Image (cartoon, rainbow, N blue to C red):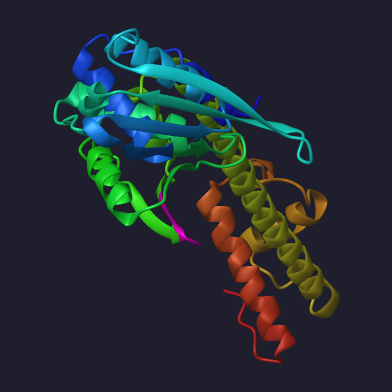
Amino acid sequence: MSFSGKVKEELSGIYPRARHCQLAELAALTGMNGLWEEEEGGSLRLILHAENIAVIRKCFTLLEKTFNIKNEIALQISVRRNLLKDSSSYVLRAEGGALAAIRQAEVQAVCCKRAFMRGAFLAAGSMSDPGKSYHFEIVCDQMEKAQYLQRIMNSFELDARIVSRKKHFVIYLKEGERIVDALNIMEAHVALMELENVRILKDMRNAVNRKVNCETANIHKTVSAAVKQLEDIAYIRDTVGFEQLPLGLKDVALTRLAYPEATLKELGDLLETPVGKSGVNHRLRKLSEMADKLRGIKEVHYD
């Protein structure tokens, strides 16, 4: 099962206790995938299509909890089989004047906003595999619905955005931290923990990669500097020799040739008169300047 499917499976088992929250979640479920028809005498008919049985099951159970299905509404569920695609879709039909309470539901309280967002995601939402990327979206068929849902989501400071996609409008989240918050708001705590574990592993991996890249760059820089030093010292030796070099420079030159892989600190400790890293670096820089002047056939001063 995909991560998105796991989230929906978890959400389908969460039922709010308060009737106003049940109505809010039903409002989202029916608003995203439902079709309302008004009958004579003030009765209403709801037709809800879904490819996910969890959506139909959730809607059916909420209707059972919210209304008296024997006296207030009539319920019917049917299955449609697509032989070409080898898939099924589901249709829930409900009828009764009491259904007007769903259409009139007020989504003002924080608990109702949580329930509405949960219903909206169940009906028309999806998530990418967090191991690959962070993406959370809910698809609406009208801009007004998208803007309404965006306002609800952003009341939780989720910074949800809207983008048009063909004939639909998509509310989406891209940041892992925002998606974690969204799962928490919808009360999908199992999925939240799974996502957090993935985020921790990815962050650790990225931190290790950054450190390795940094260390590799430093090693490359150190090796390049050492190669350049050896080339400069060898050039001085092969052109004018070391005899006229000051003792400090001669000592560093001979020691570097003898220990090409030594660090500056190790090099300093190996000298006849040990010096620190800065002292070794200063002498090697002087040798490089001399080599550059010799290559340019310039006058060299051994001071």
Q: Residue at x 80, y 56 (%)?
A: 257
Let me know if residue 182 appears in the view: no
Pick whichever, 297 or 11, lies toward us.
11
**Is 121 situated left or right of 273 in this image?**
left
Q: Residue 57 in the image: state x and y as whole percent.
A: 49, 17
- Above or below residue 145? Residue 108 is above
* Front residue (pair 239, 153): 153
- In the rendered image, the residue lying farthest to the front is 40
Position of 107 compared to 216: left or right? Answer: left
Q: Is residue 199 magenta?
A: no
Count of numbered circles in the view: 0
What range is drawn magenta here?
Answer: 165-170
Residue drawn at x 30%, y 23% as measured from the top left: 96
Majority secondary structure of the magenta segment? Answer: strand
| 143 relative to 135, above or below | below
Query: Is residue 168 on the magenta stretch?
Result: yes
